[in-house]
Amino acid sequence: MTVLIAGGGIGGLTLALSLHQIGVPCRVFESVSALKPLGVGINVLPHAVRELIELGLLDKLDSIGVRTKELAFFSKYGKPIWSEPRGLEAGYKWPQFSVHRGELQQLLLDATIERLGAGNVLTSHHLVDWTETADGIRANFVDRATGASAGSYDGTLLIAADGIHSAVREKLYPEEGPPLWNGRILWRGVTEADAFLSGRTMIMAGHEILKFVCYPISREPDARGKHRINWVAERHMPPTYQWRREDYNRTARLDEFLPWFESWSFDWLDVPALIRDCPHAYEYPLVDRDPIDRWTFGRVTLIGDAAHPMYPIGSNGASQAILDARVLTREILAQGAIPAALAAYEAERRPATTALVELNRRNGPEQVMQLVEERAPDGFDVVTDVLSRQELEDIAANYKRVAGFQVEALNAKPPIVGVAARSGAA
């Protein structure tokens, strides 16, 4: 029988491609009427890029993304704190990609339609409920635009890949309520601008209260020599701030956040110019959810942001959704499309992602910027005067360990989905 996947985002589409790879029929149901390449930039880390390569997608990734060369941290004055190579430059067997989230989703969607057929990707199908049958599950859908029934579908499993506002999770945990806001606001945009530093560098500047992140997401410049630069401005708001909680993705007003960054014009990057030259910026609250002690209920389980929404710290949201999909596929390959496969998947992935959610709440590898701010708020000449080399290395190494992408360990690790299963990856 068919595996039913609720949600056509990065996790759901990766799962569909992975199940097709091992010969398990599946169907994707998406609430919106049309899947469009929306969003801003994200990073896909080597352990997740490896899985997309196993699906035969390397050339397509190269066509839409930038192979990230390094990650560099700076103070609010633009002074270097710490930098480390990324991807192939760090010794991984696989690159790290900086890419537009919508373009990555479109890449996965196109591959899914090509391999599974358009009839197995159904839009305007919003899951409302499900029931277990004698040998499977029946899921019921509506068209949210009209309220009309979109039909019922039978399958062997139901996988919830429907994001931070998961309808499935809400049914399983009706008392949970909305995502948790920690007092931080993100303003995000993409600006056509000159390359900076290596041309493939991801930078983070500032500290816990005020931070700026940016990186290129286009490999080649346009006719004017400009690159698409994804940027994120972040501010930890005071307790009295009244955030517009009714809207998770609103058009940003530059006058509400640009003044905090007006002095951040460094000799290697002009932050205020990046913000001012952006045609469309958006405001998001920084939210996550508390880890839950169970994802799997009979023939239903959660993956991606439906299971473990986390702060976008350490570039791990999309990567962890991809790993979820691959581990779940491995267990279905080993045990069949039965509840035991879901339980085995959860036993591996839930503890790992719980640790990551909690570490991201403590700022993950970005702790180095906050420690520098606390110890040298007026600046420094040499960062090792305020933060030892050992402290810097320990923070970076600990995050890689928890997130599962230590170089030597990952390079030595066998593929998640076995070699014999990969014949359909072309």
Image (cartoon, grey):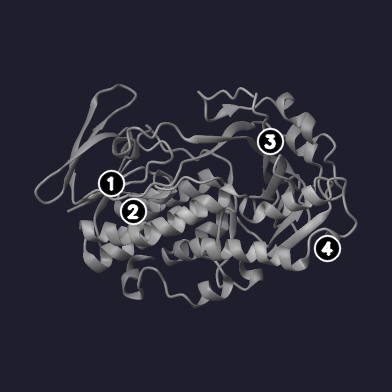
Q: Which residue is mark 3?
A: 235
| Circle 2/circle 1 CB separation < 8 Å | yes
Q: Earlier in the sequence, mark 2 or mark 1?
A: 2
Using the numbered discs, state the Cα–Cα distance from disc 2 to disc 1 in whole angstroms: 9 Å
Front one among 210 and 15 = 210
Using the numbered discs, state the Cα–Cα distance from disc 4 to disc 1 in whole angstroms: 56 Å
Q: Earlier in the sequence, mark 4 or mark 2?
A: 2
Q: Tell which residue pokes out farthest to the bottom in this image.
A: 412
Q: How many marks?
A: 4
Image-quadrant location for residue 331 = bottom left
Image-quadrant location for residue 174 = top left
Q: Which residue is mark 2?
A: 16
Q: Amino acid at mark 4?
A: Thr
Q: Is residue 336 left or right of residue 168?
A: left
Q: Position of residue 324 (x, y in %)?
A: 40, 57
Residues packed near mark 4 inside 10 Å, few (<14), some (14 to 19) or many (20 plus)? some
Residues packed near mark 1 inside 10 Å, few (<14), some (14 to 19) or many (20 plus)? some
Q: Which residue is mark 4?
A: 384
Residues packed near mark 2 inside 10 Å, few (<14), some (14 to 19) or many (20 plus)? many
